[in-house]
Image (spheres, rainbow, N blue to C red):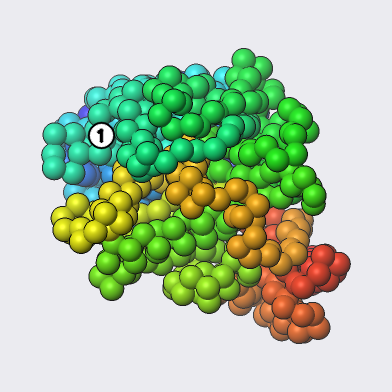
Amino acid sequence: MDRDAIIAASKKHDINVGKLYKYGTAGFRMNADLLDGVTFRVGLLAALRSRKLNGQAIGVMITASHNPAVDNGVKIVDPLGDMLEQDWEVFATKLVNAPTHEELADYFFQLADSQKIDVKSPGKVIAGRDTRPSGIKLVTALADALAATNTTYVDYKILTTPQLHYLTRAVNTEGTPKSYGEVSEAGYYKKLMEAFYRALRGRRVSGSLFVDCANGVGGPKLSELLKHHDSSKTGLQVKVCNDDVLRPEVLNLDCGADFVKTRQRAPPSPKQSPGDRWCSLDGDADRLIYYWIDPESGFFMFDGDRIATLAASFIADLSRVAGLDEQLRIGVIQTAYANGASTKYIEQHLQLPVVCTPTGVKHLHHAACAFDIGVYFEANGHGTILFSQDAIAAFKTKEPQSPAQKDALDTLSALGDLINQTVGDAISDMLMVEVILAHKGWSLRDWAMTYQDLPNRLVRVEVGNKDLFQTTDSERKLSHPVGCQDEIDQYVKKYTNARSFARASGTENACRVYAEAATRSEADELANKVAVVVK
Ligand code: NG1
Ligand code: ZN
């Protein structure tokens, strides 16, 4: 690798000196105008990361998910499709903040040295981007970094985030016993559809499913998936809505999973008829929220907690029928934002262990790996279910003792292929929900009746310096500023079934306050009081 080539290429992709960039839960994410140099530098890091891992392919995804259209972001995917290792987040931050092109090159080679990376060895990077027009320019910055470092590069162009994770894992396992699937977008669709048919095992999905695609990449990709779907085999009729990707300004505008979850209402358009089954994806199709208009009581939302409880109850039942409940440990991973009623339902009704981790799917993913079957979802609808190698082997090798056992084992095995094992995937999760409802013979009303959410309120509070707010106990308590938590506790005590916590956002310059209590007015009141404490 040539230092001068790196410097020359870097000069075409300046960063804004003076701004502090940080690799956070969503990689680097901000106004797209600030990202050209950042993306170039992320390319340099990916080039090193690939060589550190013996030339395995590293993924780079360019997306700002549910953020407004003017934003963009860039994040790195490790070879098996998981998020970038934490130590390397620190390296990414350091590399991106190098003040000059020369210092950038210096740090690049220092990092290679300290990590014992042979810069002459081959490296490979694959990339994808969502539908934001700014992504085209950012991909050029990435390509320049990979050319300057002699790194093999494949641009898969427009993809959902989970598709890029799929491809990264597929390319690194190709031709091995752990092969994750064909290394192509079509391979992803074929794998999902084949697993969907297998998981249904002849059962039929009832009625139409309306999918709000947030006017993002999920729209065209879902339409692509449907070309591989034979609805006469499954009964599923998908109606793709809000799939306008030609007008960038409508991306995530008054639609999508984030809109539905935070506003607790359906998108204003298109109009929903009472009784229809709806779901919304976010701008890069890794979050999923279901909802319907109950003909009697109106809008009802099935968020990540509901999807997790549905999946956990189904998988626990199957594993009991399959005779694997003694052998396989099933657990559910949540964050502090999970509704208390869902946690109670999992622990007391489903009798499954719950683990709480800090916000950010990398924490949930990590905790899920400790179980044979780890179900993890953030309340916002981002999540998946991880199956251990032992679990997958058990589904395939256990001799069924009855037709019911065979049905359960085959269904579990199909779910292992249907559910994205790398990251939360709205399209895959959606097919999973449809399979479960078909197996259980449930309507949305049945699903809604499993437990009743505690009324809750999430408030965003502008603070002078969010870094003063430090947490412990998986973000459920504030350790700093000293005394703050005592004040919060005093308020919480005054309400029934109440819980409240405050933490600094990892993605915005603000604090978030969450409160839940027995009634709507109590939850609102508590949230407002705690907001005053942190202000
Ligand atoms: P922050 O800004 O740290 O609260 C938000 C979401 C997370 C996660 C990240 C990454 C809430 C309360 N927080 O994090 O769940 O998805 O963004 O996108 O929804
Ligand atoms: Zn997303």
Whether residue 58 is visible to the viewer of this picture, yes or no, is no
Residue sitting nearer the eye, 94 or 461: 461
Where residue 385 appears, x then y in whole percent? Answer: 40, 53
**Amino acid at dot 1:** Gly
Q: Residue at x 77, y 45 (%)?
A: 295
Mark 1, other Cα within 10 Å: few <14 / some 14–19 / many ≥20: many
Q: Is residue 57 left or right of residue 73?
A: left
Q: State yes or no: Cβ of the residue under disc 1 lies below 8 Å from any atom of ligand 2.
A: no
In the rendered image, the residue lying farthest to the top is: 246
Whether residue 223 is visible to the viewer of this picture, yes or no, is yes
Q: Is residue 479 left or right of residue 330?
A: right
Q: Which residue is mark 1?
A: 181
Where residue 305 appears, x then y in whole percent? Answer: 57, 58
326 is higher (above) or lower (below) than 426: below
Displayed quadrant of residue 513? bottom right
Q: Is residue 170 left or right of residue 384?
A: left
Residue sitting nearer the eye, 77 or 349: 349
419 is higher (above) or lower (below) than 513: above
Count how many numbered circles sit on residues in the image.
1
Q: Residue at x 75, y 61 (%)?
A: 457
Residue sitting nearer the eye, 427 or 183: 427
Q: Residue at x 65, y 52 (%)?
A: 445
At mark 1, the secondary structure is loop
Q: Is residue 375 left or right of residue 110?
A: right
The image quadrant where one finds the N terminus is top left
Displayed quadrant of residue 156? top left
The image quadrant where one finds the C terminus is bottom right
Where residue 257 appears, x then y in whole percent? Answer: 63, 41
289 is higher (above) or lower (below) than 34: below
Where residue 262 appears, x then y in whole percent? Answer: 71, 48
Q: Residue at x 77, y 80 (%)?
A: 496
